[in-house]
Amino acid sequence: MQHLTTHEAAIQQDKKQLVIIGNGMVGHHCVEQLIERGATQHYQIHVFGDERHRAYDRVHLSEYFSGKDADALALGEADLHATHGVSLHLGVRITRIDRDRGEIITADGRLPYDSLIIATGSYPFVPPIPGPEVSEHPQARLVYRTLDDLDAIRYHAANARRGVVIGGGLLGLEAANALKSLGLEAHVVEFAPRLMPVQLDDQGGTALRERIEALGVGVHTDCATEAIVAKPDGEYAYRMNFQDGEHLDTDLVLFSAGIRPQDGLARDCGLEIGERGGIVIDETCRTSDPEIFAIGECALWNGQIFGLVAPGYTMARTVAGCLTDVCEPFSGADMSTKLKLLGVDVGSIGDAFATTEGAKSYRWIDEAGSGYRRLVVSSDGKKALGAILVGDNSYYDTLLQYVQNGIDLPEDPAALILPQSEGGALMLGADALPDTAMVCSCHNVTKGAVCRAVDEGCADIAALKIETKASTGCGGCAALLKQVFEHELESRGMEVDKSLCEHFQYTRQELYALVRVEEITSFDELLEKHGHGLGCDICKPTIGSILATCWNQPIMDPQNVALQDTNDTFMANMQKNGTYSVMPRVAGGEITPDKLVALGEVAKKYDLYTKITGGQRIDLFGAELHELPDIWEELINAGFETGHAYGKSLRTVKSCVGNTWCRYGVQDSVAMALELEHRYKGLRTPHKVKMGVSGCTRECAEAQGKDIGVIATEAGWNLYVCGNGGMRPRHAELFATDIDSATLIRTIDRFLMFYVRTADKLQRTSVWRESLEGGLDFLKEVVIDDSLGLGDELERQMHHIVETYECEWANALKDPEKLKRFRTFVNDNSSDPDIINVTERDQPRPARADEIESLAVEIR
Amino acid sequence: MSTATAINNTPRVLCDVQDLVDDSGVVALHDGRQIALFYLPKGRDRQSGPEVFAIANHDPFSKANVIGRGIVGDKDGEPVVASPIYKQHFRLTDGVCLEDDRVRLDTFNVRIEGERVVID
Ligand SMILES: Cc1cc2nc3c(=O)[nH]c(=O)nc-3n(C[C@H](O)[C@H](O)[C@H](O)COP(=O)(O)OP(=O)(O)OC[C@H]3O[C@@H](n4cnc5c(N)ncnc54)[C@H](O)[C@@H]3O)c2cc1C
Ligand code: HEM
Ligand code: SF4
Ligand code: SF4
Ligand code: FES
């Protein structure tokens, strides 16, 4: 072999010799890190790899069976070594380390080293089960670690129908998936009583087992294989005999019974080895010989082997640092894992088994859907220690942040693992979020990045957006970005300008108080006394909303018209082509057949697109401005009233059918939903408000995803507050239990008026709640215990709103002056010629630009 | 002006002052063009008397004819309207978009003559 005959010449006198044994994932990462840190100036680096392939991504090894070849799995640039003068020796095994002479030895020769890095990884453990001779029956002793192993599996699978994997851990399940993808009937045999015994507990293992069995993979737990017997004449090639007397026939057997550190070289040259294997290293990754380092899966740090790639990479960086500039000590690594095994989400975080003294667990078990989640908390219940997830990893990131950052748990930690009505996990307040938390997912901006931008001088949101690009995609993160930004400014002692806009140097809350206290009834009056300029699209709607809440004047009254957003002005929702959608109230989602027919007739007459909304009502799209009064005339005659879908106000109270029909119901949820909807309809709020009422704990109305959620109990109602669906779902929090209907209404009256009084503009209850100092407890004190003595006042203000309610559309139709505005053109009765519809699925919809072009051609 | 329903027989008249809405907008059709008319009864400084502004009703961002239905106000003292769809601001005096000054809406010269709103 030429590398050893020429190596003497290759030794450059001025450079030290650095030899790396093992060209796996970690060895390769170490080379990259050394190159990056300029180590090649001082070292001549030699890398020896037993495998014939370039270093490849072992983590994604299974993708070799789903389309990727060795090249696609390869790590880094192909010419990396050549470019940087690193000698790469592939397919060469180091057989011995001669520490006395400072040389490594291969089958063909020797090479001196000054420093040595052992990155030999691990090998699959094959338990000594009696069976046929390996040389003649390789398919009875397959393993799953290298590309060559996978080639062998593929080769033997070609003539096989059934394959068995011994070992039901993480890798075993991946191997089973591989067998399945090769078209085999796959089975997993596990010695322990459950699958993934290292990461999961019994319930987690059970849930995983059910899911995996549902995929057609046989699972045999508590099952010890005694012998593998060749059956030359049998239906299958081998029979596996189990200790309990059972057996399983198969064409091939794949071992995945754990890994063992590849520590033979180190052992033979007298380096310190752990009791159960592994090369002992210190925090600089040095072995008992200071010139020799060990990294990756062959290394034993603090009695621990790290069978994951991330800790290996950290060790690689430590060594690269020690050999060049700064040695950052290795201090262990988090073994939390998030995987998709056979398409099933599995997650394991921190102290998943509650081994910490006094640790307690919350468990959520879904036997029907084979889902399982466990949250392990400290003995005082304040911190999260670990978690197990089976079936849904959307909880993983938040839980990991709680565990890793030692964030204080919420009042009811169980909420963190309970199902979220509209997907996703609970949201953390700006303060609690760690630096790694994602603020803007469109542009991948973390809280840390926002903090850095603030440090570098971003003093307002506009600058922050330019600097970080946050909130310049879909815009959905704007509220969170603002929250984080203001929190950062405040924590740096900087002044946060909370002025509503350039026309008012007050917050929404301050303006609300001024309007109340000074009994101001118009925008002009407020502008006169406390503002300047003409106002704008920020202050006008905000103040319009405040005036409406306080005095409940019709929004169409002359002094209010100019304040409203187009949706409020025309009491309909503007759609993208300038037409409106019309949404009458269908309280609680209950509607008579007659009204249903009436809606259909109106839609037909005006050629409107109809769709059932997420709020249990029916939206009619495509009405032109001048058609709105006629449409409403007909709707009102049919007994409808406005649905306030256009307003920052109560939208809908979603309800399940309740005990009137449902066999599980314990209260009449529909009646309660109707009562709530009719009570609070028309209340103008800082942002939209949604409610839900469920007739029993099964929660079919998903009330816990709403601002106000009510769930029936045997004794009355449970009230939940400050939930949210949408793009940042938040689980509502339990506020009061087993209260009667009168108490429920009184509590909601107070709660809503307190929200209206203290929230910022366009702040949903969820965000408001996160921003309240004192949190839920404070809110309970104010609303339930009346600690501020506001109770009566809040109730009185709500009664005023309820008593003065009037359907805005009915009001407008009575007044020709108001209807004047509903004209597409003030000097012409025609329609907007640019509104062009096409028919799709038997309904009208706006034509797309390309369709309009082709239509124009046809007309000409 | 080709439309037969014009309120007055003088072709230059767009509509009556009565048709305008205080501190807000309406739309008039003129020679096939849609013109948004904004009426500030006290003027842009809130003291010098009635003023009417006319700019194109077509919103280049949403490609819908909606400018006349936006909220009127001022930015640093300049009267503006915010598009009701994606909320960009256009200066009433020259139609320039504050968020992107490469975009400009056409403006028209309109005046109040007695009870009428007229266009040059
Ligand atoms: C199927 C599979 C899925 C996995 N999934 C994940 C996952 O999802 N997440 C995760 O974090 N980890 C996963 N892992 C584990 C991860 O691949 C390992 O932690 C990582 O590869 C360890 O890197 P290493 O360099 O220490 O060892 P290896 O990658 O095993 O590299 C060691 C190399 O050294 C060579 N070598 C050994 N002895 C000698 C010698 N004497 N002379 C020359 N060369 C020698 C070997 O041939 C080998 O190429 C998975 C592993 C497998 C097999
Ligand atoms: C211009 C923007 C939006 C439009 C046009 C729009 C439109 C609608 C409509 C028409 C409905 C049916 C409501 C009803 O029946 O009263 C609805 C429901 C809903 N919207 Fe929006 N929405 C918008 C923005 C948002 C945002 C920003 C969020 C979240 C933060 C959101 C979350 C929801 C949810 C969760 C529902 C379902 C309510 C339920 O199931 O009860 N929407 N939306
Ligand atoms: S929440 Fe309860 S009462 Fe309502 S529909 Fe579901 S099961 Fe029935
Ligand atoms: S999710 Fe809401 S905002 Fe998004 S397209 Fe649908 S209706 Fe529009
Ligand atoms: S999440 Fe930030 S812009 Fe979409």
Image (cartoon, coloured by chain):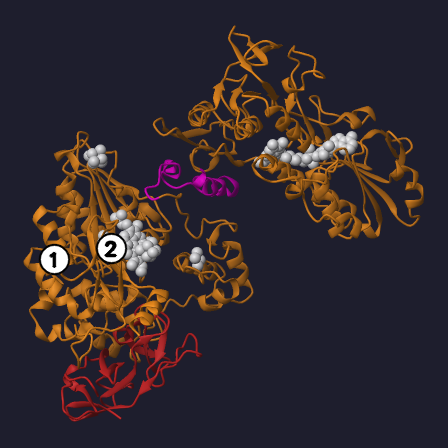
In what element is the residue under mark 1? loop
Q: Toward the viewer: A438 or A739? A: A438
Question: Is the residue marked by circle 1 packed among few (<14), some (14-19), or many (20+) residues within 10 Å?
Answer: many
Q: Position of residue A126 (x, y in %)?
A: 66, 19
Q: Toward the viewer: A587 or A128? A: A128
Q: Is residue B86 visible?
A: no
In what element is the residue under mark 2? helix
> Mark 1 and mark 2 in contact (Cβ < 8 Å)?
no
Above or below — where is B53 with respect to A593?
A: below
Which quarter of the rendered picture does the C terminus of chain A lie within?
bottom left
Q: Residue at x 17, y 38 (%)?
A: A657
Can you tell me whether the CB of the residue at mark 2 lies under 8 Å from the nearest atom of ligand 2? no
Q: Position of residue A326 (x, y in %)?
A: 74, 49
Magenta highlight on residue B28: no
Magenta highlight on residue A397: yes
Residue type indicated by callout 1? Glu
Say which quarter of the image contains residue A288.
Answer: top right
Residue receiving disc 1: A641
Question: Is the residue marked by circle 2 packed among few (<14), some (14-19), or many (20+) residues within 10 Å?
Answer: some
Say which quarter of the image contains residue A669.
Answer: top left
Residue receiving disc 2: A754
Q: Which chain is orange?
A: A
Residue type indicated by callout 2? Phe
Q: Position of residue A180 (x, y in %)?
A: 52, 28
Q: Chain of mark 1?
A: A
Q: Position of residue A245 (x, y in %)?
A: 52, 5
Direction from residue A560 to residue A386 in the image, left or right: right
Q: Is residue A592 visible?
A: yes
Direction from residue A729 to residue A683 in the image, left or right: left
